[in-house]
Image: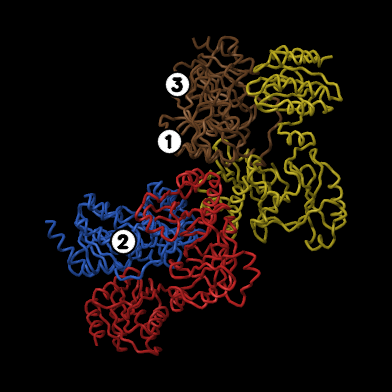
Chain colours: A red, B yellow, C blue, D brown
Amino acid sequence: MEILEYEAKNIFKDYNIPIPAGFTISSIDKLNREKADSLGFPLIVKAQVPVSGRGKAGGILKVNNFKELKLITSKLLKCTIKGIPVRTVLIEKFLKVIKEYYVAFTIDYSLRNIVFLASTEGGVDIEETIKEKPYLLHKVPIDPYIGLKDYVVRNIAYKLGIPKNNVRSFTFIARAMFNMFREFDAELVEVNPLALTDKGLYALDVRIIIDENSLFRQKDKLLKYISREMFRGKTAKEEKAKTLGLSYVELDGNVGVIGNGAGLTMATMDLIGLHGMRPACFLDIGGGASKARVKEAVNILLENPKVKAVFINIFGGITRCDEVALGIVEALKQAKLVKLLVVRIKGTRDKEARLILKQNNVEAYEDIEGALEKLRSLMVI
Amino acid sequence: MEILEYEAKNIFKDYNIPIPAGFTISSIDKLNREKADSLGFPLIVKAQVPVSGRGKAGGILKVNNFKELKLITSKLLKCTIKGIPVRTVLIEKFLKVIKEYYVAFTIDYSLRNIVFLASTEGGVDIEETIKEKPYLLHKVPIDPYIGLKDYVVRNIAYKLGIPKNNVRSFTFIARAMFNMFREFDAELVEVNPLALTDKGLYALDVRIIIDENSLFRQKDKLLKYISREMFRGKTAKEEKAKTLGLSYVELDGNVGVIGNGAGLTMATMDLIGLHGMRPACFLDIGGGASKARVKEAVNILLENPKVKAVFINIFGGITRCDEVALGIVEALKQAKLVKLLVVRIKGTRDKEARLILKQNNVEAYEDIEGALEKLRSLMVI
Amino acid sequence: MVVLADEKRYVLVQGITGREGSFHTKLMIEYGTKIVAGVTPGKGGLNVHGVPVYDSVENALKKHPEINSSIVFVPAPFTLDAIYEAIDNGIKLIVVITEHIPLHDEVKLVHYAKKHSVIIIGPNTPGIISPSICKIGIMPASAFSKGSIGIISRSGTLTYEVAYSLAKVGFGQTTAIGIGGDPITGLTLLEAAELFEEDEETKAIVVIGEIGGVMEEELAKAYARGKISKPIVTYIAGKYAPPGKRMGHAGAIITMGMGSYESKIRAFKNAGVAIAKTPYEIPKLVSKVLKNAH
Amino acid sequence: MVVLADEKRYVLVQGITGREGSFHTKLMIEYGTKIVAGVTPGKGGLNVHGVPVYDSVENALKKHPEINSSIVFVPAPFTLDAIYEAIDNGIKLIVVITEHIPLHDEVKLVHYAKKHSVIIIGPNTPGIISPSICKIGIMPASAFSKGSIGIISRSGTLTYEVAYSLAKVGFGQTTAIGIGGDPITGLTLLEAAELFEEDEETKAIVVIGEIGGVMEEELAKAYARGKISKPIVTYIAGKYAPPGKRMGHAGAIITMGMGSYESKIRAFKNAGVAIAKTPYEIPKLVSKVLKNAH
C-alpha cells in the first residue's frame, strides 16, 4: 500500500529527517497568500497521487509568485494524473540543489533479505542510469536480526563522496529511514532525491510502501498519518473488490476473467490472450469461496461496461464447484446488463455444478479447450 | 541506578501493564480525603526508598480508614529507612491476592546473556525459597539479537500453572517488561509479586535498575519519569564524589582509603582489614587523575568526621605520582580538620612525588609494608 | 523414492483446533499421513479427529518424540512465533500453509530456518504430496496420482490443474511441491529442483512459475550450468497478467529487468528448457522430453 | 612462546586520533608493537605518530592486509559499532580499552564475537602485554619484564603492582592479560587460563580476581577437574570491600550465593589453588608453587 508523498513526509518529519518546509491544500479556496509568502518564492507545487512518473506527467511544477501558484494549484486540483484524480497538492519551498543522491531500504526477493540501496545519481532518471552504469549502485544486505550498523552507512557515505561535514547527517538519515522501514513494516522507504543543499541534506521526494499483510499491527500507527480510507483500489470497483477480499485488477480488454487462485487466473488470462482476445480484468475469488462471494465477484464484472464476455475458469479443490455454480446463477438473476458468459468448471462436485449451470442456461464445460472454443465463437459474432 | 517504585510504576503504566490504582504524596498537607476515598479502603502505604527489605523494615503498611492513612503517612514521611529519608509515599488500592508469582528480566553475568526469570513463589521470601527449592526457578536465556519469543513466555506460564484465561495477560506483561528492559537499557526489571487477583494479573511491586553507562542515550527518556537529580549517591558525600567522577562508598570503619583503580583500592582495604583496622570508605580516583581531582578526593575524606586516618595507596602507570602528590598537598593546605595521613606511592615519577610530600611533612613510602607499619603505629596511639 | 513427503514423516499440526487446521487434519489422516499430534496454545488436552492436542511443541515432543515434521495453520500474526517454536524444538521440515504473513516476518523466518538447517515449505503453500504415500498439505488428493514426474509450483490451483491433466495422459507424480505463492519462500524453485535431481524415481520435472521475483531465472541458470540434468518442462503464468505494483525505483533497480514474463522465458529458452505456452500443453511436452531422454 | 600478544601481531588502532588513542599509539610503537594503521571516521588521510589514519577498517585493510588485531579507544557510545566493523572485516583479536560501555552492548558484543570466533579482550581492560615482544594496551611498560609467569587479571593497577612485585624477586611474565574490569568480558578468566595452559613457556599462572561475578568459581572448578594443570596462585580483591549494588532479588537468585569473597576463596581452596591474602604475598607463593612443581 503506497501512501501519498505528504503523508510519508509527515512520517519523515517525526523521524527528524530534514524535509523542505511546506503545506498541503485540497481546495483552491483554502490557498493562503501569507502562508505561501512565509515560505518564500519560488515554490514547488506537487500533485499528490500514488503513481510513478508524476513529474514527467506534469504533476510537479515550479512557481515564482502567488499568481502562478494559484493558477497551477487550481489546474492540478482539477486534473487527473495517470487516471488518478488529484485531490491534494503539496506546496513546498524550493531548495537549490548542489547534488542529488538516491537512498532506499527495501526487500530484495532474490536475496530474501533487507537491502540498503544508495547511489550518487539520484533523480528521476535513476533507473536508466543504474541500468547503464550498475557500478554506481551500492547495495548492502542487512541481517534482519542485527539491523543496520552505523559503520556500514558511513562506508556508503564515503563511497558516495558525501562531503565530510554531511556524513553525520547522512548516517542519521539512513538510520532513521531504516528504523521507519522496520517500525512501519515497509516494503519500501525511498528518498529520491536526497539533496545536498547549502543548508545540508534534505529529503526532497520520498516514498513509503507499507506491507498490507502487516496492517493488523500497523493500522493504529498509520491512522495518525493517513486520513483517508486505507483500503483503496485505484478505481471504485477495485475498491469494492478489495473490501470483499477479492483480488481484482482492471485492464483494457473486453473479456472479463474469473478464476480461483492467482496462478490459475493468470493462466486463464494467458489463454485468452493466446487465442487473440484481450482480458478486461483479473479477478481471483481465492480458495474455498462461498456462494455469496462468487455472486459479488460475478456482479463486479457484469456491471463493468467494458466487459463484453465473462469467462470463468474454476478448478475445485478446497473450492466446491457447486457453490461456485450457485453464486454464478444468483448473480445472473440480478444482472441488469446482459453479457456473454462461458464457464469451465472442474474438480470437487463439478458434475453437480455443471448441472446447475445447464439448468440456468449457462454454457458449462469440463475441458478448457471446449470452453475457449465457445468463447472464441461468441466473440467473433 | 535504581529508580523509585512509583517512578518505575509510571513506566509500567506507559507499557500498559496493570498496576494497582494509587497516587503519591510528599507532604502530609497534600493528603486529600476524596482522593483516598475514591480508591476505597483498605489502602496500602509504601515508603519510596530505593532499598531492599523495605517491607520488613516497616516501610509498607495497610490502613483501613482515613485516620490511619493520615497517621501512617505522616509517620513515614518523617522517618528514615535503612539510612534513607522517606521523601515520598505511594498510596495504593489494596488488592486481594489469590496467588503471587515472581517475574524478572536481568543479565546473568555467568551466561553473559539476558535471562528471563520466573517462579511460582513470588513475595518477599523468594530468595530463601529458591535457595531451598531451586527447581521452582525458571531461567531462560534470551538471544540479544532475536529477543523474547512469545512461545517461550507461554511455556513458562504453563509451567507456573498460570490459569488458562490469564496466560494471554501473562504473555503481554512479560513482553512489555522485556521491551522496557531493552528500551531503557535496564540491568533489572523485576515484578515481585506479580499477583493473581480476581480482576486478573497485577504488578504489585516492581523494581527497575538502569545501567548508568547507558545514560548518554537514556537520560532524555528517563527525565520524563524521574523528577529528581539522577546522579545521586545515598549520602551527600557520595553524591558529591559521583559528580566529580570518583567512585566512593562509605563504610563503618575509621581508616579512609584512597587508591587508583578499583582493584588496587580494594586490595588496600583488604590490607587495612588484615592488619586489624577497619576501612571508613572506598575511594577510587581512577586512571590518570589530575591534581584537582586528587585534591577533591582527599578533601572528601578529610571532611568526613568518621575518618581518623587517611591511607593513600598509588601505583602510578597512566597516573602520574607527582600530580597525585601535588593534589594531596593542596588538599591539606585547605583542610579544616587534622587527620593522620600515610601515603604509599610508587610508579611513574614516584621519586618526585615522595620529595614533594616529604617537603610538606607527609609520610610517603615506596613499599606498602612500611606504609602499613606506620599506619598501624599511628592508629594504636 | 520420493522427496520430502515420504513414509517416515511423523507430522505435528500447529494450529490444529482452527477451522482449516482441523478440517485438513482429517483429510491428511484419511490420505494416510502420520499425523501424531497437534498444538494450539491453551487447548492442550483436547482431541481433534483422534489426534491429541498439546499447549506447546515441547509438550507434544515429550509424548511423541518421533515428530520430525510440522504443518502450520496458525494465523499470520502468530506464524513467525509458531515457526520459532518448531525450529527451537528440533523440527527440520515445516510446511507453512498460512497466507498473508508480513514480509518482514518472512525475511526473519527464512533467515532463522537457514541458520538452523530447517526446510520451510511456503508460506502460502498448498503443501507437499507424494501420491499414495504422504500428504502434508491442503491439496485435493484426487488430482494427484503416483508416477515419475516431480512438480514444483508457485501456484496452488494451477498445480492441481496440471497434476490432473498429467493424469489424463497417464503421468503421475513422485512428489508435488508447492513452494508457496509469496515473493519470499523458504524453499526456492532451484532448491526444490535439486531435491528432484537427486531422487532416482523422478524422471522429469514440471516447473510452474509466475511473473515476479527471480527464482525462475535462477533455476534456468542452474539448468544451463548442468546443475540440474533431468528434463524440465515449465510454464510461466502471467504473460497477459496486469503489471504488479511498482516498488518505487528500488524494484526496478534491484531486479534489473528480471522478473518479467519475457525475462523468465528468455532465461529458460537460453537454458534449453521445454516451455509450455499454457498449463494444458504441459502433458504433451512431458511426453516429448521423456521420449528424447531415452 | 607467549600467548595472544606475539611478534606476529599487526595492529590497527580504532579511535587513533583521540587523546588516549594517540598517546598510547606512541607508547605502543615505542615498545615495539607493530602498529600499522589507525581508523577514525572522518579523519582519513591524517597521520598519528607516523601511523596512517583511515576513515574505515575496510580502507585500512585494503592498504594493510596484514592487520590481524585491533585495539579500540573509541568512546563508549560508538564502541559496539567499532567492534562490528572490526569483526565484519575479519579481525580476530580485539582489545577493547574503552570503559563505561552499556551492559546491553556488552551482551551483544560477546554474542557477536563468539559467533564469529573472535577473541575480545576487555572491555575496560588495560590490554595485553608480552614483555619485550608486544604490547597491545595501555599498561606502564616498566612494571613488566620477560619471564615464565602468566598473569590474568580483572584489575588494571593491581596487575602493574603484581608484575612489579614479581620482578623484584626475579619473576617475569610470558604474557599479562587484563581481561577487563566489567561484569561481562569477552575473554573469561578460565579461557585466559586455558591459553596459558597450552603455552609451553608459561610455568605458573597468577590470577588476580575480584568479588562479583562467578568467573573465579568457574576457573576453580576447571582446575579441580584437571582442565588446568599448571600451578595457579590467586589473589581475590574485595574481602573488606563494600557490598556491591543489590540487583533486586534477581541477583541473589541467579548467583545462588556465588560471587562473594567467601565463595571464591572456598572454590579455590577446594580446588587446591594457592591463595594469597594480599597482592604482595603473590611472589612468595609463586616461588613456592614452582618449587613444588619440580
In this picture, is A247 found above or below B147?
below
Q: Is residue B108 left or right of residue A277?
A: right
At horizontal 88% and vertical 54% (from top left) the residue drawn is: B29
Which amino acid type is shown beneath numbered disc 2?
Gly
Q: For mark 1, what is the residue? A: D90
- Identify the mark at residue D7; answer none if there is no mark: 3
User: Could you tell me which chain the residue with mark 3 belongs to?
Assistant: D
| Mark 3 secondary-structure assignment | loop
User: Could you tell me which chain the residue with mark 1 belongs to?
Assistant: D
In the image, residue A288 lies at what x, y percent? 38, 72
Judge by depth and name the residue closer to the eye, C268 or B5.
C268
- Identify the mark at residue A191; answer none if there is no mark: none
Q: Are the residues under badges 2 and 1 in a single subunit?
A: no
How far apart marks 2 and 1 lie (CA) works out to: 51 Å
Q: Is residue B297 left or right of residue B346?
A: right
Q: Name the image quarter holding residue A295.
A: bottom left
In this picture, is B350 found above or below B15?
above
User: Could you tell me which chain the residue with mark 2 belongs to?
Assistant: C
